[in-house]
Amino acid sequence: MALDKERILDFAQKLVLKGQPKKAIAEYIKLIEADPKDKRLYLKLGDLYCKNGENEKAITEYMKLAGLYTEEDLNSRAISIYKKVLTISPKHIDALHKIARLYLKEGLSGDARNYYLSILELNPNDQEAQKALNGPDTPPPRDIPKTMPAVEFPIPTDYPPQEEIKPFDDKSDLFPSSVLEPQILPEAAEIPPPDKDSEMHYHLGIAYKEMELFDYAISEFEQAASNPFIKFDCYIMLGSCFLEKGDNAEAIQRFKEAAQIKGLTKEKLVRLHFNLGLAYEANGMLSQAIETFNQVLSLDQSFSEAQERIRRLQQLQK
């Protein structure tokens, strides 16, 4: 008889909330045996092992997950999972090798070199690393984060004071009427598409963000933002990451930087205004949030979530 996957997933989550991780683990193992290709199960199981202090078992599940991503040629996601393994075990040779190979597969030899150098620090006789580093094309190593800084995810229960952040003195300076209609960059044809390197950093940032590894995601988006073709998307992602971390001031700053990009289309302005409104709201700047959500509606009257947030914020102000 087929398993009711969603029912078991719901039951496993309830076990986690009740502080019964071992029982939840048993349920996830049962689900994986029934559907060994469901990648979300390996991630959940690995996370549960981590929380339960069973790091070796967690690494085993993460390595399986990264292998599944590699089979589907989802290399950026595979790399992000292998890097998650390294946050648990920085000297995990197999993970280092696999990351280096995937970077080479993506044409990012400089990034691969960094990992081969790390491998040789651990094992100077590693033949694969020696061969890779002695090849004809060996660019200099690049700076990459070697350790994952501690990340906290605060959940604010009230709004912080406002003295530290100044609202815009003139909204028209940031969002002039001339940009309320879709525009096209006059030199758009001259902007190069994202190169392989920046594109890879962007997709890595997305993968890290989905796993709530926000510091890693921020590092990747900052590197990808050097390409003007994806600069706007990178700033929006950076703002969202800082918002998730509870750093509302930095989120507002990144959205403001995105607003300075010229030639934004109407769709991008809607996205920008809404995210900026969320940042203002999270920072307790209710008036600014309402104004910004109204900017969303001036661009797209059908944006129901902006309407709902304005209504709720107005009630809070009463």
Image (cartoon, rainbow, N blue to C red):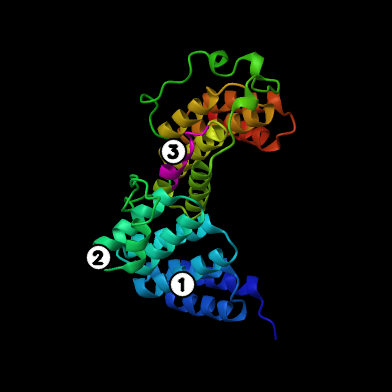
Report the residue marked by disc 2. Answer: 124
Q: Which residues are magenta?
A: 217-227
Mark 2: which amino acid? Answer: Pro
Instruction: Kindly identify the residue that appears in the image at 58 percent across and 25 percent down.
Output: 292
Report the residue marked by disc 3. Answer: 222
Q: Is residue 151 left or right of residue 78?
A: left
Query: Which x, y percent locates residue 317?
Result: 54, 28
The overriding secondary structure of the stretch rendered in magenta is helix
- Quick one: SS at disc 1? helix
- Quick one: SS at disc 2? loop
- Quick one: SS at disc 3? helix
Mark 1: which amino acid? Answer: Glu
Report the residue marked by disc 1. Answer: 61
Report the front residue among 19 and 317. 19
Which mark is nearer the camera, 3 or 1?
3
**Dot 2 alpha-carbon crowd within 10 angstroms: few under 14, some 14 to 19, many 20 or more:** few
Query: Which x, y percent locates residue 270?
Result: 64, 30
Residue at mark 3 to residue at mark 1: CA–CA distance:
30 Å
Label whose residue precedes the other's in the sequence (3 or 2): 2
Query: Which x, y percent locates residue 46?
Result: 45, 69
Marks 1,2: beta carbons within 8 A: no
